[in-house]
Image (cartoon, grey):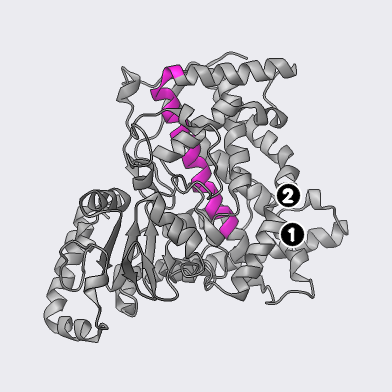
């Protein structure tokens, strides 16, 4: 949150404190504070919100350095525990996974996920179990991921062509990576590229991404409906929801008409909407999938995939540009692999041989995790973590940014050294490294996302050499400032100069 917004909020809430302070505080349950995790001094009403910057993962990491790997924060009216170590993350995501499997009902998600009907934000229970099973077995299975190989090839080829057209000139790689992610996800979700969508879906989805990435004061003051109204958030959310429902209905009608014209189609030709329309008609569903739930599930795949994919590409290419020796080593691996296969480019079958490139991506996600604060969890019953009490209803945040820089887990943690990742696991088993979360609420789309990231990086490393953009004299001078959002992006665009080699 920026300083001006925070200052305005502080003034507003402090003015209200004389009237509402005693009422609010008197209604809070009595807490056994002796058992709570360490906590910094707070203020009336807002608690510890004033301690957070516009990069809350950094603020929380600094608090953890002072107070320890588990801290208690009162964020507005929300009890919050922040975890910053692998050992405690394992307790939350494995030992007590069943206790922390619920999600808090965040304001933007309640609107834009059609009442939290997606996989990411739906409450733990029968519907979530069914929705996740559908995603794992129908939308994001290995078979389905492989079925989109042609789409990945076509979209990455378009990326290479766009870079090739500007060889020798400055290229905004951040912009191209974001376009690649949007086009890729739109094609597999809706059947068309981002800007080819009917019903102004591109503009609507852009607003959806912004609203889900933004900061919502109502999340910290549940029950204070006027907060969302006064901030204008309620009006924006209602408008975007109405637009999502309209364009979503158009997409469903278009897919139903296409199915009527073409008759039954094979799985390899189905996009996500096709798949869910087929699943919707099954008679073995425990919870019926309404059209709104269908829209929520498809939008979840799109929103969860676009920013994280483009952010990972952006940060990986930034780290490679900052470390020319590592860049050269990764290029040599890619080019030798393609030469051994006798191809004129990198094919998807070659990716399994690119061990060093995979290590580069992992090391990037350690230092620049796309989601530095994992999607919040909420405790469903009282639990003990590291000797401290976490009561039912507490919001739990896992700070992967802090964990990736923990000297207790990593030797020289601020050094970019891909070699440290020989054999490290993406899938929530190495609790030092959780780019996709872990436990039963871990991200089911890691295979789909990594296939796009690996293919895009392999191709642009194979076809081009890279030089620094204008105004950057040395690699170490590349700007590494970030912006917190749905995924953490670079504050300034990554601009490089490509030179076509192959």
The spot of residue 201 in percent (x, y) is 58, 56
Establish if 385 lies above or below 182. Answer: below
Res. 195 in view: no
Whole-number angstrom distance, CA of label 2 to CA of label 1: 10 Å
Front label number (2 vs 1): 2
> In the shown orientation, is residue 4 left or right of residue 135?
left
Q: Which residue is mark 1?
A: 275
Q: Residue at x 69, y 63 (%)?
A: 134
The spot of residue 453 in percent (x, y) is 57, 37
Q: Quadrant of residue 46?
A: bottom left
Marks 2/1 in contact by CB < 8 Å: the verdict is yes
- View extreme (front): residue: 387
Q: Quadrant of the C terminus?
A: top right
Establish if 421 lies above or below 431. Answer: above
Res. 111 in view: yes
Q: Which residue is mark 2?
A: 144
Q: Residue at x 57, y 64 (%)?
A: 119
Highlighted range, magenta: 300-325
- View extreme (right): residue: 263
Sequence-wise first label, 2 or 1: 2
Establish if 419 lies above or below 42. Answer: above
Residue 32 part of the magenta-drawn span: no
Q: Residue at x 31, y 71 (%)?
A: 78
> 93 or 251: which is nearer to us?
93
Q: Quadrant of the N terminus?
A: bottom left
The spot of residue 170 in percent (x, y) is 44, 22
Q: Quadrant of residue 380?
A: bottom left
Dot 2, how many residues are within 10 Å of its Cα: few (below 14), some (14-19), or many (20+)?
many
Q: Secondary structure at mark 2?
A: helix
Dot 1, how many residues are within 10 Å of its Cα: few (below 14), some (14-19), or many (20+)?
some
């Amino acid at each position: 949150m920026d300083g001006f917004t925070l200052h305005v909020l502080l003034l507003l809430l402090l003015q209200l404190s004389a009237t509402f302070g005693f009422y609010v505080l008197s209604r809070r349950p009595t807490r056994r504070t002796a058992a709570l995790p360490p906590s910094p001094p707070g203020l009336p009403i807002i608690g510890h919100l004033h301690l957070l910057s516009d990069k809350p993962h950094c603020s929380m990491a600094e608090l953890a350095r002072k107070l320890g790997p588990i801290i208690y924060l009162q964020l507005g009216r929300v009890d919050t525990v922040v975890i910053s170590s692998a050992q405690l993350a394992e307790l939350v995501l494995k030992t007590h996974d069943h206790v922390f499997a619920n999600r808090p009902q965040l304001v933007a998600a309640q609107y834009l996920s059609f009442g939290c009907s997606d996989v990411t934000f739906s409450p733990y229970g029968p519907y979530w179990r069914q929705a996740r099973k559908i995603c794992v077995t129908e939308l994001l299975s290995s078979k389905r991921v492989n079925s989109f190989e042609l789409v990945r090839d076509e979209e990455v080829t378009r990326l290479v062509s766009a870079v090739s057209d500007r060889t020798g000139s400055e290229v905004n790689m951040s912009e191209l990576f974001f376009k690649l992610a949007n086009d890729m996800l739109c094609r597999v979700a809706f059947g068309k590229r981002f800007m080819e969508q009917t019903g102004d879906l591109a503009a609507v989805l852009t607003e959806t991404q912004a609203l889900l990435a933004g900061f919502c004061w109502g999340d910290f003051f549940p029950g204070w409906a006027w907060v969302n109204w006064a901030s204008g958030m309620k009006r924006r959310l209602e408008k975007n929801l109405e637009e999502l429902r309209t364009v979503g209905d158009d997409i469903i009608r278009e897919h139903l008409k296409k199915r009527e014209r073409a008759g039954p189609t094979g799985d390899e030709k189905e996009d996500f909407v096709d798949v869910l329309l087929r699943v919707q008609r099954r008679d073995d569903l425990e919870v019926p999938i309404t059209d709104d739930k269908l829209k929520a599930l498809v939008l979840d795949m799109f929103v969860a995939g676009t920013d994280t994919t483009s952010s990972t590409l952006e940060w990986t290419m930034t780290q490679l540009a900052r470390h020319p020796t590592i860049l050269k080593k990764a290029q040599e691996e890619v080019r030798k692999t393609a030469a051994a296969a006798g191809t004129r480019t990198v094919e998807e079958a070659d990716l399994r041989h690119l061990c060093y490139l995979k290590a580069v991506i992992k090391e990037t996600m350690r230092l620049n995790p796309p989601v530095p604060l994992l999607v919040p969890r909420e405790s469903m019953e009282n639990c003990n973590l590291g000797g401290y009490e976490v009561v039912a209803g507490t919001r739990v945040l896992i700070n992967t940014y802090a964990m990736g820089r923990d000297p207790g887990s990593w030797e020289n943690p601020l050094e970019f050294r891909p070699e440290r990742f020989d054999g490290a696991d993406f899938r929530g088993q190495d609790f030092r490294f959780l780019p996709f979360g872990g436990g039963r609420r871990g991200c089911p789309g890691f295979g789909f996302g990594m296939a796009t990231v690996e293919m895009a990086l392999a191709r642009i490393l194979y076809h081009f050499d890279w030089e620094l953009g204008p105004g950057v004299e040395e690699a170490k001078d590349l700007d590494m400032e970030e912006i917190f959002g749905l995924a953490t992006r670079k504050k300034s665009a990554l601009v490089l100069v490509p030179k076509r080699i192959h």
